[in-house]
Amino acid sequence: MAPKPTTSSYAVLALLNLKPWTGYELTNQAQRSLRYAWPKSERLLYSEPKKLVELGYATTYVEESGKRSRNVYEITEEGRLALTQWTRTRTEPPRLEIEALLRLLFADNGTMEDLHRALEELEADVGEPHQAIVELMASYLDAGHPFPERTHLSVLFATFQIEMFKSIERWINFARDEIDQWPSTSHLGITERTGELTRLLANDRSPLDT
Amino acid sequence: MAPKPTTSSYAVLALLNLKPWTGYELTNQAQRSLRYAWPKSERLLYSEPKKLVELGYATTYVEESGKRSRNVYEITEEGRLALTQWTRTRTEPPRLEIEALLRLLFADNGTMEDLHRALEELEADVGEPHQAIVELMASYLDAGHPFPERTHLSVLFATFQIEMFKSIERWINFARDEIDQWPSTSHLGITERTGELTRLLANDRSPLDT
DNA sequence: TCCTCTATACTGCATCTTGCAGGAAGTATA
DNA sequence: TATACTTCCTGCAAGATGCAGTATAGAGGA
């Protein structure tokens, strides 16, 4: 029985629509570019093209170009059709998993040092992709875009990432300033400051803007 | 054999550390408050407390308060210890899944209308939790915080959310303005504008700030 | 020439996580 | 008394992840 295509299947299918890739290239490419919007494991990325073949959305052939054999995947007409149909479906709601924030929410179980460490880890984990995307843009500038006719899409996409990364980094600094005013992680309760922040937030105003 | 606690186990354990809950309350609470940092399915949230009992991190007893019986879970001393130890471990890197952005990246497979619809869906999906958290803050203001001594934590946590939601909404409006300049979704390629945006991003400057 | 090291190119398996379907016990409505 | 709705879960199939393992190719040194 044919498997059901998931959002990840369509993500890989969309890559195949750009050009044929080997399984290896596909996982690398997906981890370099898709990870900002659709982070998936290497393991899954290797399985998806096989599923696409089973579905008739891709064909595969073995290439023996001097080196060792590699599976090459190519999109089919049926796959192209499935792609445009996917484009018309409802998107899934976004999903943000940030363990460092969970630590903040329950920071009263640990020390101030633990909390600061969680923020440092978040800063590092955000800084890495942040830097990577800045470098990617720089590489477009001097080596050109791999698919020049798609520049407008990747640039608008990158704008989102940069915006997110900068927001998070800005918040981290704000959080540090706040935390530095705390005597400890726990039992601070309702102070002048927490009341002020609650009022701001209840009026949908960000304390970072002031 | 005893199961291994996952980050989700500790998230539930941290809730149990505040007070005892029934399984039902736990899933509801987790979906109302934790979802902003650690979104997990109802199904999982029902399973986690059982795992905690198996691990010795919680005890359970059946309450027959007039109504039907419900399982009540309570943290143990061992559980409290495990919690503080968790606080000292390395956090997992954040993970942002946003299908609407995937649609943007491959928008050349669809029409302008498809792309606009994806942005509207993102706006709605972000607007819902955005409004919910603003209302939560308003409720703290006039009904008080359920755990007053933890106000500083939830307020700083909420600051992050508001900041994120506002950034995303700001980007959506920016994206709409950009897209409105496009003749179609595909083959726009390198224009004056895409070059300008690439240069900004390559210098780590957000086009939204200008 | 042989050896080790790293990069390429995957697969199998145990475990975690999700969605969905169902079910049974109370509670309100007609 | 019938029925419909909400509470309060459980079972199961299928999706996704991490990790260990396999196997070839080329590069650099002894």
Image (tube, coloured by chain):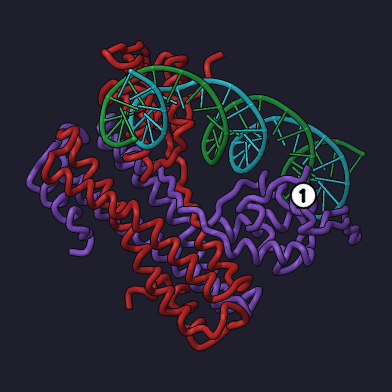
Chain colours: A red, B purple, C cyan, D green
In this figure, what is the number of numbered marks? 1
Asked whether the viewer can see residue A66, the reply is yes
Quadrant where the image shows the N terminus of chain A = top right
Q: Vertical placement of B154 versus B27: above or below?
A: below
Report the front residue among B162 and B176: B162
Residue for badge 1: B50
For image coordinates 47% across by 73% down, the residue present is A202
Left/right placement of residue A87 relative to residue A46 reads: left
Residue B170 pos. (x, y %): 30, 59
The spot of residue B185 in percent (x, y) is 22, 35
Image quarter where the C terminus of chain A lies is: bottom left
Tell me which residue sits at (49%, 77%) in the image: A198
Marked residue chain, label 1: B
* Residue A119 rendering spot, x and y as whole percentages: 45, 66
Dot 1 lies on which element?
helix
Residue A14 shows up from this direction:
no
Circle 1: residue type: Lys
Residue at left offset 45%, top offset 47%: A94
Which residue is outermost to the left? B192
The residue closer to the viewer here, B158 or A59, is: A59
Q: Tell me what residue is drawn at x 11 percent, y 44 percent.
A: A142
Quarter location, residue A25: top left
> In the rendered image, which quarter is residue A151 located in?
top left
Q: Is residue D25 above or below residue A176?
A: above
Give left or right: position of B19 versus C10.
right
Give neighbour class at mark 1: few <14, some 14-19, many 20+ (Cα, 10 Å): some
